[in-house]
Each structure stands twice: as C-alpha cells, then as structure tokens.
Image: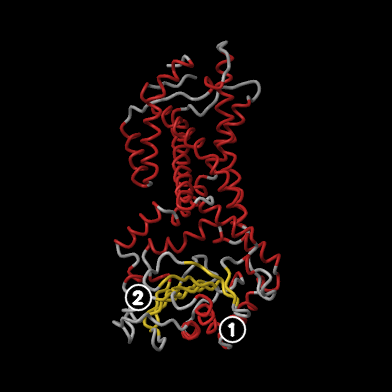
C-alpha cells in the first residue's frame, strides 16, 4: 500500500530527522562521558555502605551518634579550630553536615568583605586538621568513613569535565540538546505512525537497518520520560538554565521564604552575625531538626539571624528551613516542604529526580538502564543511517563512500516547525544560539557538499 505524502510533509519530516540525527551525533562524545560518570555516582551510597557497613547501614546508630555529638559539645569545637588554622582574615559563612554519609563536617570560608567565592574545607575535630576534600582526610580517623577519591573525582568530572565554567557550559549544552533530540524523536515517531511511514514493507528476512531501527525506536520511546527527567532536573545546577530558573522563581515569589528573613534581637547591627554552631544545632534539634543532612548559614549582620536547612530520608534534599535568632538561638520562623510554592518544591526534588534516589535502589537500577540506553541510542542511530544509505546506494548501483551515506539537508515549509524551534530556543538559551549557528553553517556548506555527492 502506498501512503500519499505531499511535499510539505516530506520536507518537514526530513528536517526533523536531520536535526534529530545531527544533534545526537554532536553531543555523543560528552554524552558518553556523562553516562559513565553518572552511572558511577548513582550507586555511591550503596558502595560506601559496603565499605563501611556498621556506620552507614545502621540509621539508628547514626542518629544516636549525632545526638551524642550534640550533648558532648562536638560541634562547638569546629569553628574555633578553623579560626586557629586559617586566621582572622577568613570567615566561616556556612557549615555543612552530611551525617547520613558519615563525612567530616565541612566549612565554606571567604574574606569578611568578599563572601564569594567560598573555599570548602573538611574539619577533623580529633586532630584539628583541615582538608580540601573528603578523600584527603581518609585514614585520619578510622572511626568515621569518608568518600573514596573515585567519587569526588567523578563528581567533578561529571559537572565540569575538569574544565571549569567552560566545562559546565558544555555539560549544560549536552543536557539541553539531549532533551531536544529526544523530543524530536518522539515527534518523528508520532508523525510516522500517523502517516504510515513507520510501517516497513514486508521482507523475507529482517535487514540490519530494520533491526537497528526497531531497537532505536523502541528503546527511545520507552525511556523518553526518564531521559527528560534526568536531563531536565540536572539543569537546575547549570549556568544558564539554572540561573534562569532560579531567577524566575525568585521574581514570582517562590523563594520568598529565603528572601523575607525574620529579624533577630540584634537586627541592624553592623557587626558580623555571630555563628555559635553547637548552640544553633541544639536549639534546632528541639524543633524537630532532620539530622541526616544539615546546612547552617551565617546571614547578613543586619538581620541578626542564622538560617538552618535540613533534610532527612524523604527524597527532597532539604525539607526544612529554620531561622534562629543569632543572639539567643530562639526559633523565629520555620518552613516545611508543604509551605513552599511549586517551583521551590520542584527545586527540592530536582536532586532526587536527577540521581534516581527517590525510589531507592530499584529506581537507581532503572536509571542505570536508562543511562545505558542513552549511550547506545546515538550509536544505533549512526549505524542505522549508514546501513540505510548503503543499501540505497547499492540498490541503485552507485559507489559507496562516507560522504554519500550522510543525510542531506532538508528545510521545513510548515510554520509550526519554526515555532517549535523558537520555543526550544526560549526554553534553553544555548539551544537557540546553537540552532542558529549550525543552521547557518549548514546553509553555507550544503551546496558545496551537494555538488560533491551529486545529491540535490
């Protein structure tokens, strides 16, 4: 049966196919690195539990240890140790405790008159030593497990490719284009399905092309939601999209709980807000502080307030925000997860959705399978395209060469295609810029390439 196709539908389909293919090819190298490093980081907790079964597997032991540390003034020693090592010119602006992972307490320090950027140090309260990373402190205290160097290095590579801000932009570029090419693939599937193009002619034996296409389409469609979930939530920690999202959330009042800071008794003071870590933690503990993960932050001196964010076993990383008076550590305000707007809630969920930790080990296994699929999709697309063009060339008696098996340029004639690309450009600023750059290069190079391969 022959399905009628007008020139507009053929052009639009080829245009979508063209972008779907070349976007995937363009991001493949970095995408493969992201899948490998992301797969390692997925099971960080499970690996650490194997390495340190007593400390990390027993939640009740961890909780008892935290409460014991509070009662024994363990946390009161941290800031004096840091000041003694670093001197008065540096100020501790933030303290982070990851009790669930058994890490040493970490402090973020910077000069008083320039709070950004901040340098992180891990503090060993038994020796008073400061370490720039968890693995450098490994072995200093055998009673407290620390991350292996593998995880710290892998995290840095996953986020920045060891290339600083430029690497962060490359990672963001890869994530945004992954979403774009995935959505284009879904659109292609629906258009082919509706027009009948997705139904191959009957053959006596399945060709390599048909087998590759079946795998590519089936795997891509089944994993679409998971792929978009992983990539989109990872963008919350990116340069362009992350800044855009948080700026929009702030402008629409979603982050008012962070901006409308209650005033303490010493509000208006020009002196630096005091930070008594032990007293703040003991006071917050009385008000139901989640002990698994805690962040204590010194705010502006004019507020007279200390902010504490904490999270527990519930998937969002930080489910509570408490404001304490910096003078007597009385509770001034408390915001739980249910008190927040939808953008703020989504931001709380973004880390769990990105890492697959919201459903336990089974979700992580599913996310690992998705990462494997993501890595295989561009490879199968390349193999499928080459196999199809090679078959076409052989059927017409033409010589087979690399230039001839690459897909040709196709321009859309329907306005909705341009509208879709425009919306993508607005959603992802990097996509808009790259679409323009690649389209311009394609337009300039296509005539030359067409003459070379004899394809109009």
**Viewer-proximal residue, 167 or 171?**
167
Residue density around tag 2, few if under 14, some if 14–19, many if 20 or more, within 10 Å: some
In this picture, residue 361 sits left or right of residue 241: right
Percent x, y for residue 188?
A: 45, 34
Q: What residue appears at the point 52 percent right and 21 percent down from the top-left corner?
A: 403
Q: Nearer the viewer, mark 2 or mark 1?
A: 2
Name the residue that disc number 1 marks. 69
Measure how far apart labels 2 and 1 are at the Cα level: 28 Å
In this picture, residue 194 sits left or right of residue 312: left
Residue 210: image quadrant is top right
Q: Helix, strand or loop at disc 2?
A: loop
Percent x, y for residue 76?
A: 52, 84
**Viewer-proximal residue, 271 or 308?**
271
Depicted 379 relative to depicted 317: above or below: above
Depicted 285 relative to depicted 340: above or below: below
Depicted 80 relative to depicted 133: above or below: below
Residue density around tag 1, few if under 14, some if 14–19, many if 20 or more, within 10 Å: some
Name the residue that disc number 2 marks. 300
Q: What residue appears at the point 52 percent right and 65 percent down from the top-left corner?
A: 315
Q: Helix, strand or loop at disc 1?
A: helix
Q: What residue appears at the point 60 percent right and 85 percent down from the top-left corner?
A: 68
**Viewer-proximal residue, 311 or 328?**
328
Quadrant (top left/top right/bottom left/bottom right) for the C terminus: top left
Percent x, y for residue 49?
A: 67, 66
In the rendered image, the residue lying farthest to the top is 397
Percent x, y for residue 264?
A: 34, 84
Q: Are marks 2 and 1 in contact (CB under 8 Å)?
A: no
């Amino acid at each position: 049966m022959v399905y009628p196709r007008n020139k507009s539908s053929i052009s639009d389909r080829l245009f979508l196919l063209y972008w779907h293919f070349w976007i995937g090819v363009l991001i493949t190298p970095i995408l493969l690195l992201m899948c490998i490093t992301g797969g390692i980081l997925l099971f960080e907790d499970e690996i650490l539990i194997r390495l340190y079964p007593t400390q990390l597997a027993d939640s009740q032991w961890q909780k008892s240890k935290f409460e014991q540390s509070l009662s024994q003034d363990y946390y009161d020693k941290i800031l004096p140790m840091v000041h003694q090592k670093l001197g008065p010119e540096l100020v501790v602006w933030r303290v982070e405790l990851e009790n669930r992972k058994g890490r040493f307490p970490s402090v973020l320090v910077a000069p008083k008159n320039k709070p950004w950027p901040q340098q992180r140090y891990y503090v060993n309260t038994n020796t008073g030593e400061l370490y720039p990373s968890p693995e450098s402190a490994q072995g200093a205290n055998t009673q407290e497990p620390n991350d292996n160097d593998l995880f710290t290095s892998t995290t840095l590579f996953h986020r920045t490719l060891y290339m600083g801000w430029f690497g962060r932009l490359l990672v963001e570029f890869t994530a945004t284009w992954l979403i774009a090419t995935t959505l284009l693939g879904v659109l292609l599937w629906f258009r082919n399905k509706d027009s009948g193009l997705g139904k191959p002619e009957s053959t006596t034996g399945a060709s390599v092309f048909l087998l590759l296409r079946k795998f590519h389409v089936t795997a891509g469609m089944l994993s679409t939601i998971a792929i978009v979930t992983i990539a989109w939530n990872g963008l919350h920690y990116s340069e362009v999209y992350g800044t855009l999202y948080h700026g929009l959330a702030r402008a629409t009042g979603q982050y008012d709980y962070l901006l409308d800071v209650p005033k303490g008794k010493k509000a208006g003071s020009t002196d630096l807000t005091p930070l008594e870590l032990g007293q703040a933690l003991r006071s917050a503990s009385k008000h139901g502080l989640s002990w698994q993960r805690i962040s204590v932050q010194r705010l502006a001196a004019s507020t007279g307030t200390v902010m504490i964010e904490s999270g527990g076993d519930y998937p969002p990383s930080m489910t509570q925000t408490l404001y304490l008076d910096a003078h007597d550590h009385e509770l001034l305000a408390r915001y739980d997860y249910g008190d927040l707007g939808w953008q703020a809630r989504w931001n709380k969920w973004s880390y769990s959705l990105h890492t697959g930790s919201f459903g336990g080990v089974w979700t992580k296994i599913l996310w690992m399978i998705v990462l494997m699929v993501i890595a295989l999709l561009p490879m199968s697309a390349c193999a499928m395209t080459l196999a199809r063009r090679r078959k076409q060339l052989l059927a017409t008696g033409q010589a087979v060469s690399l230039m001839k098996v690459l897909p040709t340029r196709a321009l859309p004639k329907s306005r909705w295609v341009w509208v879709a690309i425009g919306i993508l450009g607005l959603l992802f600023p990097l996509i808009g810029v790259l679409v323009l750059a690649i389209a311009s290069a394609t337009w300039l190079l296509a005539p030359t390439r067409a003459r070379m391969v004899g394809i109009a």
